[in-house]
Amino acid sequence: MPEDKNEAPVNDLEQWLTRQVATYLDRKPEEIDQHTLFTDHGLDSVYALTFCADIEDFLGITVSDTLLWDYATIRALADHLTELVAGSGRQGAGTP
Amino acid sequence: MSTPNPADRVDTLERLLGDPEDVGNPLGYGPLLEADEADLMFAAGERALDDFGLNAEFVPSEYGGRLRGLDTFIGIMRAVYRRDPSLGLGYGFSSFIAGVNVWSAGDEDQCREAASLLLSGQRIAAAYHELAHGNDFAGTDCAAVRDASGRLLLSGRKEVVCNIQRSRALVVLARTAEGRGSRNHSQLLIDKAALPPETLVDLRRWPSVGMRGVQLGGMEFRDCPVPDSAVLGDEGQGTETALRSFQLTRIALPGMLCGVLDSGLRLAQRLAVERELYGAPVSALPTVRAQLADAFVDLLISDCATTVAARGVHLLTGQSSVHASAVKYQVSGHLMGAMDSLSAVLGANFYLREGRYGAFQKLLRDLKLAGFGHAARVACLVTMLPQMPVLARRGWTEGPEAPSEVFRPDVEVGALPFQRLSLFGRGRDSLLTALATGAERMAADGAAEGAEAAELRTLVGQLLDESEALRRECALLRPSDIGVDAPPEVLRLPARYAALLSASACLNVWLESGTRGDPALQDPAWLIAALHRLARGLGHAGVDDIGPVRERLYSQLAERYEAAESFDLSRRRLPS
């Protein structure tokens, strides 16, 4: 699955997630790799919970509070969220 | 069906334990102190709790026990802590901690197994702690790894764990994947009797400053084969289960520990009325009366905060992650501060390990656990901090309205909603919102009159100003400010938040007390004193002269002492 390191974000959502993570870590977006585990980036587990609120506000959906634990890289998270948003037209996205 | 109601159960337990100061009582302070001096659990006390069937209080009613409301559980355990905190923790609370994780994540068989162990009087140790990692769960080293045949083998050490040696079963937090991720640990419910004894090696006992009788031991697992049926929930769910379950136990612990201050106050008041100095009882000294009254207020604040947080678990779904850390931080501070202050009232007597007031030093030592046990105070702030910016953005004054039952301990709540605990409050906090709505209601009701109404308006005004200032500061927090390495000044923000939640709990319990008919609770004196204390702690001026209110509170305290009543919200008649 992981290909090149630090490849460019593939879409807007991934770009936004990358910027958010960079802000959290006080680093530049281009230093954030899409395939590195959030915990290896230094995002603490409790801290990761609150990231969910940013995502909810940005996408206007409700997500599970363990979202970043279960989709633990930017790429995995972006893929999952893309599916959620696509599905949210039919029914409420994610589990509350 | 045949379970007596909670208040009757507490009365039964108190009667069983008898008057602690009666020298002829085998369950009194004398024999209890002897056990403590010998670093032993209080055997007669444990037998009494066996007779009472205390373990049934740890088991949900659907599995044959008596556990339903968290505040009810706290009330029953508070009676045990009022007598001997070592009994509270060492008989029992550690089994409750393990149990809650089972009820939260276990399947039907696991829940039945745990229930049957507890109901037959056996213990389950909560084996989470490793000396090298403390509150840093992600660092847990003890590991359950699959061998070539796919069998889980547990190896590593758990240290300073209550009752690990004498328990029949353990709930163990073990690493099931490498790294610091939040899905890398699992909880295992293991029955010691079903495993090869050579793979479970008891470590030594750790002697302690307080709760000296509690058996803090350790265990080394040596390739211990654990059946797959031991895993609670899914593999990797261990941290999540712990973070959910510990919301309950972090609310319960300070709530139960209110019993320690209740007894400490009784001993201090006893000295104050019995001992003469300068030709008058010590209680004639204004400073002493002020110290006693302030400690009484600390106890009422603590009881309001924990009672409301406990009822919030049932009635404010998904919001308890912030409340649990807040009360663990705030209440432990009030309790320890009050006991320290009372030790000055006792003077040299607090330093003696025997005699008429000898139990005080034990209570003081035992209470130290409140500061670090089951999450250190600073760890509680670190847990709250990341939620502060979201709260500032979403909730604060616009949270969903709290139902009035949250503030009415007289109304029974249903069974504990183990499956509805949320890791994250999503920026909503009905308790904080209730500070503002409570203030509006107070103004509209005219619940207090004259000078007291003016004092309450002043205090609530200061607290609302504080709330708004805090919201603004929290909204400015940058993501890089809120990690575990947050600077001390940033950690003041969740500390201030915790104080505001306590203020909201006090205000609303008082507002609802009108429906209950306890005249002492309806008297605004305690509320004025409580809000004054909290406002001062937040750097506000409070009211101009708290003196008269303090005097009134001291009289109420003295009245309760004479009537052998507890000093908490329940104002329960105690054996004398």
Image (cartoon, helix red, strand yellow):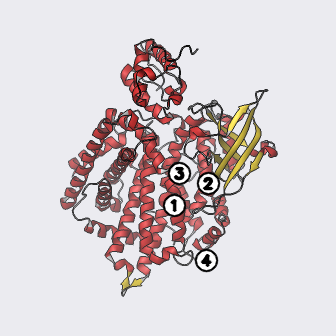
In the displayed image of the protein, which residue is found farthest to the bottom? B279
Pinpoint the chain carrying mark 1.
B
Asked whether disc 4 touches disc 1, contact meaning CB atoms under 8 Å apart, the reply is no
- Spatial CA distance of label 4 from label 1 is 26 Å
Residue B81 lies in quadrant: bottom right
Name which of mark 2 and mark 3 comes first in the sequence: 3
- Spatial CA distance of label 4 from label 3 is 29 Å
Asked if one can make out residue B343 in the rendered structure from this viewpoint, the answer is: yes
Identify the residue position indicated by label 3 in the image: B73
Considering the numbered disc 3 on the image, is that residue within a helix, a strand or a loop? helix
Which residue is rendered at x = 35% and y = 45% of the image?
Answer: B493
Describe residue A2's horizontal placement relative to residue B50 as left or right.
left
Pinpoint the chain carrying mark 2.
B
Q: Can you give x and y, in whole percent of width and height, for residue B26 in the image? A: 63, 72
Identify the residue position indicated by label 2 in the image: B92
Considering the numbered disc 4 on the image, is that residue within a helix, a strand or a loop? loop
Q: Are marks 3 and 1 on the same chain?
A: yes
Residue type at tag 4: Gly
Identify the residue position indicated by label 4 in the image: B24
Q: Are marks 2 and 3 on the same chain?
A: yes
